[in-house]
Image (cartoon, coloured by chain):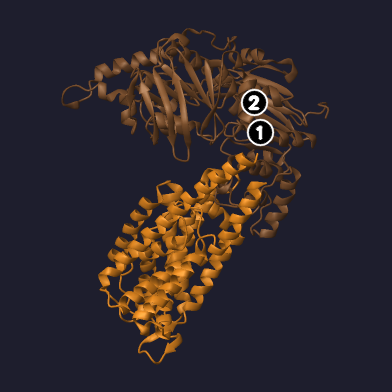
Chain colours: A orange, B brown
Amino acid sequence: MTTVTSAARRFRISRLRGSNNEGVLVVAIAVLAIVVGLFSPSFWSVATLLNVGTNSLENVVFAMAVLIVIISGGIDVSFMAIGIFAGYSVIVLGNSTGIAADSAWLGFVIAIAIGLALGLLNAFAIAGLRLPTLIATLGTQGIIRGVMLAFIGRKVLPTYPPGLESLSTTYLFTDHAAIDTRLNVMIIPSIMICVAVSLMLRYTLVGRGIFAIGGDAESTRRAGFPVTGLRVLIYLMAGALAAVAGLMHVTQVRLANPYELVGGELDVIAAVVLGGASIFGGKGSVSGTVLGVVLIALIKNSLILLGVPGAWQRAAVGALLLIGVSAQAISAVGRRRRGTIVQEEEEAAA
Amino acid sequence: MSGDHPLLVARGISKHFGGVAALDNVSLEIRPGEVHCLAGENGSGKSTLIKIISGVVKPDAGVIEVGGETYAHLTPRQAIGAGIEVIYQDFSLFPNLTVAENIAITSLIARGRRAVRPSDLRSIARPVVERIGVGLVLDARVEDLSVADRQLTAICRALAQDARIIFMDEPTTALTWREVSALFRIVAALRESGVALVFVSHKIEEVLRISQRITVLRNGGVVVSGEASEFDRPALIRAMTGRALSDLTPSDTAWREGQPMLEVEGLGRGGYFEGVTFDVRPGEVLGITGLLGSGRTEIAEALFGVHPADSGSIRVNGQPVVLNSVRDAIRAGFGYVPADRLKQGLFLEQSIARNVIAGSLDRLVGRLNLLRQSVADRLAETSLTNLHVKMSTSRALARSLSGGNQQRVVLAKWLARSPRVLILNSPTVGVDVGSKHEILEMLRAKSREGIGIIVISDDVPELFEVCHRVLVVRRGRIVTELTGDRLSEQAILDELAA
């Protein structure tokens, strides 16, 4: 009897906190907003919201790619390389050949195709050659970036094909009080992608299979999941998502720079881990990840407002990554301890 | 249930790996509503037989009749379709998913579903959980469950797949004594509903207690198969090992005369155990037992300096010693064989010889702290020969050895140091009956040579077989000392259950 009641009690408390500490993140974001607002009243403005939105709309899509991989028990450091490869290639292709020049839609379709191809490279290395994911994606990151610089181009391109040019200036909101503070319409597809990934992870057998692999790959095989196929699918999805995010980024900045993005993996990985995804696999949620991305965007925004030098931003995000990982480790220890107490209660009750 | 119409018949199954016959003309019959025990030592072919029946391995010869069909070999899907489920020792569960998901997910895959609705999960999981009448919380994550509840989840998953024959590999190894009783009640209930269970087990007492029929395998062949009532403990051991084993408890009393070589007084460690006082005399094997979580392992770890005690005193040969680290303990002449020998006791990816000398490196170095290889080789060879380790060469990896031989290598490592006190935690878990007996024999021999031996275990027959005295630990305190006439298997069981 003791097990039932104490398990039920634990279940209720964990509900408030969210299964992946989402509740804690909401509190952290609220506290941050209040504190920074006290020091710098300009923080409480529509402009801040729009800035955070602009920053996050591409990063949440990158984060979805990373989330899927991390839940499956892997880690991906090639997603930024895939993103910039796809984004930059679509601009080069549109400018030089006119392919997909008039339609932003087609541009994204081509980006997705590139992302799938590059994702297949990861899938081959990980599901085919069975390489450890960190090393495999570190290798493909180098290959992807090298191939792009060698064959696609090295120049920073200021002119865009008309389709993407017009998308880049289509805004959902414009804050007239603050100059240049706008929110691109791409926030809508970005939100839709998050919802789609969330539904996929929760309500499809593929999604549960991704969690299952992260929990125990051998058991997943024994349960009848096609594990290799599932792994291929994971890296294909991650590639496609990274490509979409990359083109979103290139479109937003309106200056296609092949040297961008790679090196910025930290922000996204930190956001996913802060959002409760376990680096050991098997755990994570879209809502937590979105909150993680928003928290990091807010912190970077706040540091600027507070006049902290840019170099410290990276340090701050790095520290957040460590905090996220430590929080996981601490809660794991807590769970073990609770387990022991339950056992003692049982012994005592019997 | 009458056994007229068997659920499954395997006939004339043979399987060769390379030139070695893993199974040779083996037949097995499983009847509805029976607990059938598959007994045999490591390497007798039990796991190969299970793999063939569950469709993981293809046999070279023989047929399997199940569900009215005859197969030359089964695919995993056909086996599951025929109601055959295997619960492996590690349960193959997903720790990060809920109980309901763990129970239902295999069924969903088998049905070729793409969508997973929470309501489906519950409608699959709830009836099975209710069927065996256990209090599993469907929304709890499996990693938060006790080992026993995880096993129940695995059983429920098998039932959700309409299992009619459930194979369970060493189902009681990780369970406490009370949990084993609970498991046996559920097994009885399942039998009522016509499900057959096949237990693969090393534990003779359990085999005799729970099964209706027993099939004993040895060297890839069936030695005997029959009603459980036709067997007793010696007969079963003889069938499994091919020889009779003496299992008299040590009756020698010479040890009583000796001066204590180890004296422990008022030992305590906050929150784990307190006021632990006992001594060990030369020639004596002392047993310490208790339920999981009683503090028995913590006491052993304190004596070996892994988690030092914070109160009390320890004297070796009358001299007080301070054991604040493993280093201190080794210097004071202690050796410790941990329970989880794969993780803590062996370097699996290193050679057998290197494993043996790993504990004695400080004695094997010459000038400049370089290893004297020839001395080391000699030490390794002598130790391995003394312990009868069966291996191709001492250069083979420790991983390549069977459980029993691995345990001997761990023992060889500590005996190579000639310790004064050797502490063994669950020394024969996962070791087959024959090796188990030899290991226990050896412990007794070592104790006669004057090494103080402490065995930490909850394997009652093992304690009874090897120990002169047994201390029972409950909630961190020694509550009873059993010795002489008061030491019997039943007495230990009663104390554990109290």
**Which is more toward the observer, A296 or B92?**
A296
Tell me where residue B498 appears, x and y as whole percent.
64, 30
Q: The disc labelled 2 sits on which kind of residue?
A: Asp
Tell me where residue B48 appears, x and y as whole percent.
59, 28
Outermost residue to the left:
B368
- Judging by the rendered image, the residue that carries numbered circle 2 is B494
- Closer mark to the observer between disc 2 and disc 1: 2
Subunit bearing disc 1: B
- Both marks 2 and 1 on one chain: yes
Q: Earlier in the sequence, mark 2 or mark 1?
A: 1
Q: Residues within 10 Å of mark 2 (few under 14, many from 20)?
A: few
Disc 1 element = strand
Residue A269, picture quadrant: bottom left
- Judging by the rendered image, the residue that carries numbered circle 1 is B167
**Which is more toward the observer, A247 or B447?**
B447
Q: Is residue A49 visible?
A: yes
Q: Residue at x 26, y 24 (%)?
A: B362
Q: The disc labelled 1 sits on which kind of residue?
A: Phe
**Which is more toward the observer, B147 or A229?**
B147
Q: Is residue B406 above or below residue A343?
A: above
Labelled pair 2, 1 in contact (Cβ < 8 Å): no
